[in-house]
């Protein structure tokens, strides 16, 4: 039974000692279902832009180069739906959701090119933490129907693989620290933080909020302590990563 294969994967992931072992177990499961390709990404904020880091993936030869060259990331309905999705979704549902998009012609070209690489359909599983979207797991290839139970199990598997890969790459402690960070700021502290992120000095923040320089520095020190940050620049970087400011 295929569902049993997903449950078995969840057990084997914990026993895997290397990323290659995790990938082998995942690929065995995907072949059983008829999927050929997959991707696992870490999402984080660097400065004011959210970036994606590929933790583990397998795509058709030449597809990623074509995707980048033709700048499909700017119109990809799957990427855009991921920005607001609260649960797993199917590729074709994302394409349908943007059927009236002004970039429809480019989206259709994207779909045609993807089909040439046997990327006909797939599923995306957003991975959430306390700070919002922190990653995604995608499986693709042929157009395959998954039951609600299978979707739920794949979602669980994607999240478990995500954290296992982070553990093996030594990235889990930093992300976990951000996940548990005390970011409960007061309204005034948030105001100071936002103005700092806009590039203002303490003097400028003080004038903007009609408070003293000393008070501004006091607020900044409190925020720095809450974030366990090294300096003001580190405070701003952490705030972007947590999604407190954009």
Image (cartoon, helix red, strand yellow):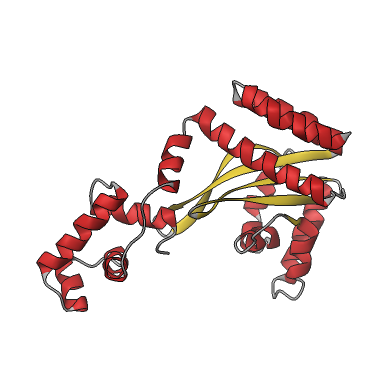
Q: Is residue 73 visible?
A: yes
Quadrant of the frame with the N terminus: top right
Residue 168, percent across and down? Answer: 53, 28
Q: Which quadrant, please, contains the C terminus?
A: bottom left
Q: Image check: 97 left or right of 70? A: right
Counting the numbered discs, the total is 0
Residue 147 in percent (x, y) is at: 85, 50
Residue drawn at x 29%, y 70% is: 191
Is residue 71 visible in the rendered image? The answer is: no
Occupied quadrant, residue 56: top right
Image quarter of residue 38: top right
Q: Is residue 200 above or below residue 159?
A: below
Residue 34 position, x and y percent, is: 86, 39
Which residue is depicted at the point 82% across and 40% down?
Answer: 35
| Foreground pick, 68 / 232 | 232
In-front residue for pair 66/21: 21
Q: Where in the figure is residue 111, as x and y percent of width and height?
A: 79, 58
Q: Nearer the viewer, residue 141 or 33?
A: 33
Q: Is residue 233 left or right of residue 175?
A: left
* Residue at x-position 79% and y-position 67%: 96
- For image coordinates 77% across by 56% down, the residue present is 90
């Amino acid at each position: 039974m295929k569902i049993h294969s997903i449950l078995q994967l969840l057990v084997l992931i914990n026993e895997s000692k290397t990323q290659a072992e995790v990938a082998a177990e995942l690929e065995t499961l995907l072949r059983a279902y008829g999927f050929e390709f997959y991707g696992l990404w870490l999402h984080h904020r660097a400065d004011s832009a959210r970036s994606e880091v590929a933790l583990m993936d397998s795509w058709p030869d030449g597809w990623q180069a074509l995707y980048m060259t033709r700048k499909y990331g700017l119109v990809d309905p799957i990427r855009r739906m991921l920005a607001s999705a609260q649960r797993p979704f199917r590729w074709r549902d994302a394409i349908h959701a943007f059927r009236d998009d002004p970039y429809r012609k480019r989206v259709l070209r994207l779909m045609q090119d993807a089909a040439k690489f046997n990327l006909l359909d797939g599923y995306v599983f957003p991975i959430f933490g306390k700070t919002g979207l922190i990653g995604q797991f995608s499986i693709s290839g042929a157009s395959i129907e998954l039951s609600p139970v299978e979707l739920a199990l794949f979602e669980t598997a994607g999240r478990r693989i995500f954290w296992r890969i982070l553990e093996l790459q030594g990235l889990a402690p930093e992300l976990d620290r951000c996940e548990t960070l005390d970011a409960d700021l007061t309204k005034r502290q948030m105001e100071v933080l936002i103005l700092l992120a806009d590039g203002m000095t303490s003097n400028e923040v003080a004038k903007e909020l009609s408070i003293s320089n000393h008070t501004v520095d006091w607020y900044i020190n409190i925020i720095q302590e809450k974030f366990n940050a090294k300096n003001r620049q580190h405070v701003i970087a952490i705030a972007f990563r947590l999604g407190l400011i954009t």
